[in-house]
Image: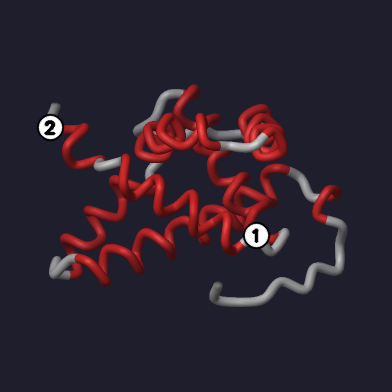
């Protein structure tokens, strides 16, 4: 992974929204890296492709692919993130999609902050194989 984690606060004391704050960056970096490594898209098209994965709608659909693969502990983190209250909702997403995306991001943040880099890799590979937001939006 990019950085090693040296947490000075017990991860279990962190709010799901704090986990989602980190998870948002972790997931977006993984998507950006993969798009650059595997495509020849121009920068503007890279951004558009990335948004299809990292938007609330994209994360909601991606979660449907990953949810069956999650351990019980991962499902608890996901549920905590989904149930976290937020003051606002994304412009282009339903409240359900937005809550799911917060849970999705909390999961990535928790995995990263607990040093589970191998698991991050496993889940991201599974997601990349199963989830094509371009194809889903055309269908």
Q: Is residue 123 left or right of residue 22?
A: left
Q: Is residue 95 left or right of residue 12?
A: left
Q: Residue at x 21, y 32 (%)?
A: 136
Camera-nearest residue between 105 and 1: 1
Q: Position of residue 124 (x, y in %)?
A: 44, 53
* Residue at disc 1, secondary structure: loop
Determine the residue located farthest toward the bottom in the rendered image: 3
In the picture of the structure, the residue carrying the numbered disc 1 is 116
Residue 95, above or below 112: above
Q: Residue at x 12, y 32 (%)?
A: 138
Q: How much space separates mark 2 and mark 1, taking CA atoms?
A: 34 Å
Image quadrant assignment for residue 93: top left
First in residue order: circle 2 vs circle 1: 1
Label 2: how many Cα within 10 Å (few below 14, some 14–19, many 20+)? few
Q: Position of residue 122 (x, y in %)?
A: 49, 54
The numbered mark at residue 139 is: none
Residue 11, above or below 68: below
Residue 12, above or below 112: above
Q: Position of residue 35 (x, y in %)?
A: 27, 63
Q: Position of residue 92 (x, y in %)?
A: 35, 33
Image quadrant assignment for residue 132: top left
Image quadrant assignment for residue 117: bottom right
Asked if the residue at tag 1 contacts the one at tag 2, i.e. Cβ–Cβ closer than 8 Å, the answer is no
Q: Residue at x 43, y 29 (%)?
A: 64
Q: Quadrant of the C terminus?
A: top left
Q: Is residue 47 left or right of residue 87?
A: left
* Residue at disc 2, secondary structure: helix
Label 1: how many Cα within 10 Å (few below 14, some 14–19, many 20+)? few
User: Of the residues tagged 2 and 1, which is closer to the observer?
Assistant: 1
In the picture of the structure, the residue carrying the numbered disc 2 is 138
């Amino acid at each position: 992974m990019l950085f090693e984690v040296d947490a000075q606060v017990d991860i279990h004391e962190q709010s799901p929204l704090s986990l989602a704050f980190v998870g948002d960056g972790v997931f977006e970096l993984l998507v950006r890296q993969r798009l650059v490594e595997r495509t020849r898209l121009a920068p503007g098209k890279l951004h558009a492709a990335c948004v299809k994965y990292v938007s609330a709608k994209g994360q909601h659909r991606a979660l449907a692919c990953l949810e069956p693969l999650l351990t019980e502990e991962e499902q608890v983190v996901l549920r905590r993130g989904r149930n976290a209250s937020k003051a606002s909702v994304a412009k282009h997403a339903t409240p359900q999609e937005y809550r799911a995306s917060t849970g999705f991001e909390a999961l990535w943040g928790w995995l990263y902050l607990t040093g589970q880099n191998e698991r991050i890799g496993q889940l991201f590979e599974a997601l990349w194989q199963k989830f094509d937001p371009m194809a889903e939006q055309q269908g």
